[in-house]
Amino acid sequence: MRTKFGLRTEVLLRTVYSAIENDLLVVGPSFVAHSLNVSKSTAQKMLVELSEMGYGVYVPKKGLVLNDAGRREAVKAVRNHRLIECMLDEVGVREVCNEAEKIEMVAGEELMRALEEKYGDRKRCPCGKRIPEVTP
Ligand SMILES: [Zn+2]
């Protein structure tokens, strides 16, 4: 899915996840603007869009306060990305992150299930980053 700004939701959610990893309780437009190299007003609109999708509450002048659904989606987006990287690494792809970014947007449930089965026990992706677990 793409946001109104043409950015893929997966990319935005992974940015939101990195805010969580940095222990930010509120995901502010400055953080998103800096990470995605967009203007602060665009970043703000993106965060409002996530709130409209049911992922949290947008507090004006502060940012997005994620709810459980939002946190879960963000973790899932990162987990999917890193599981795809595991697969790409195995077939000898070097630019795993770039390639994973293309695949994650079209990956269907069956592929993700297969990747869960094959790489689900891994703790880290090929670049050494932690593969987060989705809490039910
Ligand atoms: Zn990685």
Image (cartoon, rainbow, N blue to C red):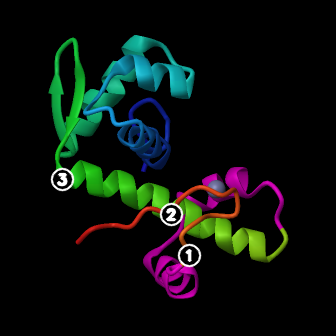
Q: Is residue 68 left or right of residue 91?
A: left
Residue 81, image quadrant: bottom right
Marks 3,1: beta carbons within 8 A: no
Which of marks 1 and 2 precedes in the sequence?
Answer: 1
Element type at mark 3? helix
Decide: is 75 above or below 123.
Answer: above
Element type at mark 2? loop
- Identify residue for label 1: 122
| Span colored in magenta | 93-121
Q: Residue at x 33, y 20 (%)?
A: 44
96 part of magenta stretch: yes
Decide: is 19 above or below 30.
Answer: below
Query: Which quadrant of the render holds ligand 1?
Result: bottom right
- Identify residue for label 3: 68
Residue 13 position, x and y percent, is 40, 45
Camera-nearest label, 3 or 2: 2
8 part of magenta stretch: no
Which of marks 1 and 3 precedes in the sequence?
Answer: 3
Image quadrant where one finds the C terminus: bottom left
- Identify residue for label 2: 131
Tell me which amino acid carries mark 3.
Asp
Tell me which amino acid carries mark 1.
Arg
Residue 27 position, x and y percent, is 31, 29
